[in-house]
Image (spheres, rainbow, N blue to C red):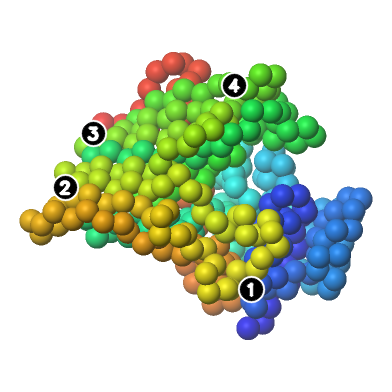
Amino acid sequence: MKPIRTAILSYGMSGEVFHAPLLHAHPGFELAVVVQRTKDTARQHYPTCRVVRTVEEAIQDPAIELIIVNTPNELHFKQAAQALQAGKHVVVEKPFTVTIKEADELIALAKSVNKVLTVFQNRRWDGDFLTLQHVINNRWVGRIVEFEAHYDRFRNYIEPGSWKEEAGVGKGILYNLGSHMLDQVLVLFGMPDVVDARMGIQRTGGQVDDYYDLRLTYPGLNVIVKSSYLVRIPGPRYQLHGTEGSFVTSSNVDPQEQALKEKQLPGGRDWGTLPKECWGQLNTTIDGAHVQKSIETIPGNYLGFYDNVYAAIREGASLDVKPEQARDVIHLIEAAYQSNRERKAVRLKVES
């Protein structure tokens, strides 16, 4: 492997917890540059990387091939465009952009300069989501009639000093957690016909939306997507119901994020695994026989995202997370906000 020299534009939570350790663990990448305006913690963690003070220094470095744009949401479009114009490949932290217009412009720019552009939708490599896809692909619950997904937390305070808690363009839980959930729904079922959304602020003193309840309608299928910061006793992450049975996962989130926070690196034998008591439950009929059992959770693997990015840059492989798919996520977010403002369902597909 010829390592891809990479720069990260921020060393906040996503840079320190996700991108830096994954790039460090992957033999196909060299973590060469990190932007930190005042601190030097990235160099302390990765002594061979160079810390620079401005985004421009990183983007204009002629030795850098790949830029990770993981700055606040409203900067994604501007900085991704600057990186593409400088001849770099680009990974954008979710959400891709704030608007569909911005997404379309970035997609067109990437094509014009013939550079890879993708979005860090790492939750496609969560173990419970990989397992859910396995259940669906095997048609173990028959024809699917309802799917419900939750991404709940308990955080009843306003995190001080966090840009995510400040009112502004591209802020709020739907852009934050919703971009993960809507990406998963699009992977499973494609674009819905109708979006009906309600969202708002539940926490005392909050300035940004901190809950949402989205209803997505497909022919013969209803999808419910919910998230809140005020859920102290979480229910199942995923519930899948079909004409033959149901599959329900536990409330446990994928263990990779916590492991990365604890400075563990991927690659160990038990990486991304959940204990048996956290496996999903299947109750269905298969080939005329009643089946009720636990389904082993497939180990999660966030390195799979960077495996694909390496293959796309070095070998011309097709992207797993195509920018057009990330654009569809923004389309759904904009439709959800419209639905909430108008207090009515929004039709995305025109009936023929």
Q: Residues within 10 Å of mark 1 (few under 14, many from 20)?
A: some
Q: Earlier in the sequence, mark 3 or mark 4?
A: 4
Quick check: marks 3 and 2 in contact, CB under 8 Å? no
With respect to residue 77, does 272 lie above or below? below
Q: Residue at x 52, y 69 (%)?
A: 270
Residue at disc 4, secondary structure: loop
- Residue type at mark 4? Ile
Split into 4 quadrants, where in the image is the C terminus?
top left
Q: CA distance from mark 1 to mark 2?
A: 42 Å
Split into 4 quadrants, where in the image is the N terminus?
bottom right
Q: Residues within 10 Å of mark 3 (few under 14, many from 20)?
A: few
Q: Residue at x 23, y 40 (%)?
A: 145
Q: Report the front residue among 275 and 215.
A: 275
Residue on which disc 2 sits:
244
Q: Residue at x 30, y 44 (%)?
A: 240
Residue on which disc 3 sits:
352
Q: Residue at x 25, y 42 (%)?
A: 241
Q: Residue 132: give x, y in percent of width and height.
A: 36, 54
Q: CA distance from mark 3 to mark 1?
A: 48 Å
- Residue type at mark 1? His
With respect to residue 225, does 196 lie above or below? above
Q: Which mark is in front, 2 or 4? A: 2
Residue on which disc 4 sits:
201
Q: Residue furthest left?
A: 288
Q: Earlier in the sequence, mark 2 or mark 4?
A: 4
Q: Report the front residue among 256 and 187.
A: 256
Residue on which disc 1 sits:
26
Q: CA distance from mark 3 to mark 4?
A: 38 Å
